[in-house]
Amino acid sequence: MPAIALPVSASALVGIGKSIVVPVVVAVLTAIGTVLITRASDAANRRRDRYAQAVETLVAWAEFPYRVRRRTDDDSATLAGLATMGHDLQERLACHQVWIATEHPALARIYAQTREIVSAVVSPAVTEAWESAPISKPADMNLGEWGPGTTSAIAIARLQPHIENRFGFRRLGRGLRAWNPWESRSGSSSAGQART
């Protein structure tokens, strides 16, 4: 049987194969990298939204005594609406606590400490607010130094850097440091402005 002659040498075929395979491999790796980066970015955005909701709920809880104190009547609908708001805030705080515990246990401990600090000043203020008469004139809306504003604002401001460390390059480079809510940190000293 006569030998079959190939029109192209074997080395030429290897060269053609490399020139096809390399761009295909690069394209596949680029596509995989793009998908991974997009998914990581989407996950970070979802986490960021959930942390923002957790802080928003803490702020709403700190604001709740002001809402009760500034009510304009004691009608059953007003009282029921405020009571529902208070229950909803407590449920949301507990839900955020559980979510953060599954996402990052160390940060969940810091969030729990912040909740305790805020609740320690909110609870007595809510009790006092419920015992106060409804507001009857505009001047009574100005509550001066009354309420949990300063303490709550400081505690929430000191939580912020720990949440920031959960994103971007800070997430890779820093762990959560031991946290003392009354220890001063740069940039948080002006956060404790009194509510009026």
Image (cartoon, rainbow, N blue to C red):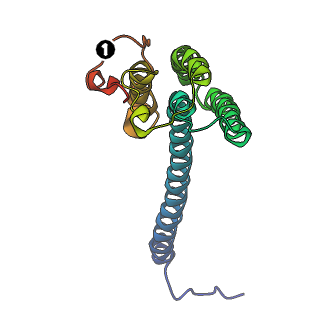
Q: Disc 1 marks which residue?
A: 184
Q: Residue at x 32, y 26 (%)?
A: 191
Q: Quadrant of residue 5?
A: bottom right
* Residue 84 % position (x, y): 71, 37
- Residue in the foreground of this view, choosing between 116 and 111: 116
Q: Is residue 133 visible?
A: yes
Determine whether 135 is above or below 121 in the image.
below
- Residue 159 is left or right of residue 64, and the answer is left
Determine whether 91 is above or below 8 in the image.
above
Q: Residue at x 64, y 26 (%)?
A: 101
Quarter of the image where the N terminus is located: bottom right
Q: Quadrant of residue 4?
A: bottom right
* Residue 189 % position (x, y): 28, 21
Q: Residue at x 37, y 21 (%)?
A: 145
- Residue 62 is left or right of residue 80, and the answer is left
Q: Is residue 164 visible?
A: no
* Residue 144 % position (x, y): 36, 25
